[in-house]
Amino acid sequence: MVLEVYGHGGDLVTASARYGVAAREWTDFSANINPLGPPPGLLEVLREALPDIVRYPDPGHRALVTLLAARLQVEEGALVVGNGAAENMALALLGLAPGKVGVVEPCFSEYRTLAEQFGARVLSVFGTEERAFRATPEEVEGLIRETDLAFIGQPNNPNGVQYGLDELRRFAAAGERYGTYVVIDEAFIDFIPEPERRTLLPELLDYPHLILVRSMTKFYAIPGLRLGYAIAHPETARRMRDKQVTWSVNALALRAGEFCLRADVSYERATLELVKEQREKLVGELTRLGCQTWPGEANFLLVRVPEPWTAETMQTALGRRGVLVRSCAMYPGLTKRDIRVAVKEEPACDKLLRELNAVLGDSLKEESC
């Protein structure tokens, strides 16, 4: 039985019902959230803001937009604040009304789900294991030529890898040449140190058909509030905002976003250091246990478990031990043995490795009997 009833990780309600573990007792590697939790002081700010729930939030998100424009060095009219990155993807589809949408498999399932919900036909190309599940530039360019809007993950979920800057420029230029909107999903880019990030943000105005989508939910650990934004040519951004439901972003989410953008840089530095250290540790230990990994650069790893294990049997075995991982068996282009694990704080990573070692050890004992 598939645990990902809604197509995503982090569903503790379903997991608790299936494995009998209370929601607060899970060590959850199925959702890719900052292991440090929210920035220090955010919870206190939200408690102080609770009286604001008797008033409507600002439908123009003006305070947050001003802070974002200053941080990103873009004009305010280029920004669309949404109820998570997924709403911005939906607004791009609604505002631009593409008949054909392109996706590069494997990828975030919402690209296809949203496109089909809004009546578009979905075309796809596939990345290969040899390229860490990136498609070739020629294949992506061909996809852009054949569609009205194309989604590209940067870094991509679930493999966590980036395309090079020259490849991104090639994709954006193809969008201009063929009149196709290129939506680059940068939801996890904040987990990559700035010198290593590959983004067209500084060149955004060179590509009127380019849309960048980012999340504040993941890096600032506020998935229960939901907050994200898109950056695009002002006319494109306007078309997206015109399709947005009024007050879709609540007052507490807006207040949280404003606080996070003012957070001390030490929080961001500590996050990047922790993710890098624990990601490298996980790669080494998972390899030692017989798993295969790919060179992810974000706060998660794509992992192939050793035979005869499958994603489903491993998810069940770890689930009974209070550890939740994300099955990737349903991702087009991946196999029934693929899972995704988040990079978390050291005690949690140690628990994952300990339980995984026990599970694999038990299976070896059974085989030798």
Image: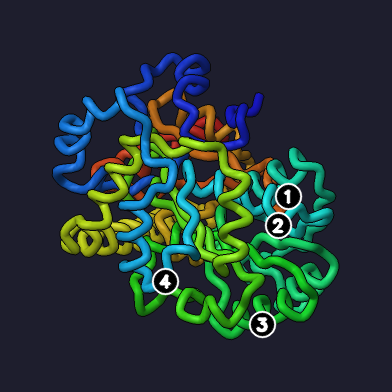
Q: What residue is pinned by disc 1?
A: 332
Distance from Cα at disc 3 to Cα at disc 4: 22 Å
* In this picture, residue 66 sits left or right of residue 125: left
**Proximity of marks 1 and 2: CB atoms separated by less than 8 Å:** yes
Closer to the observer: label 3 or label 2? Answer: 3
Q: What residue is pinned by disc 2?
A: 105
Distance from Cα at disc 3 to Cα at disc 1: 25 Å
Picture quadrant of residue 138: bottom right
The dot on residue 143 is none
The dot on residue 170 is 3
Badge 2 crowding class, 10 Å Cα cut-off, few under 14, some 14 to 19, many 20 or more, is many
Distance from Cα at disc 1 to Cα at disc 2: 6 Å
Report helix, strand or loop for mark 4. loop
Q: Closest to the observer: 122 or 283? A: 122
The image shows residue 204, relative to residue 219, as above or below, that is below
Closer to the observer: label 4 or label 1? Answer: 4
The mark nearer the N terminus, 4 or 1, is 4
Q: What residue is pinned by disc 4?
A: 74
* In this picture, residue 43 sits left or right of residue 305: left
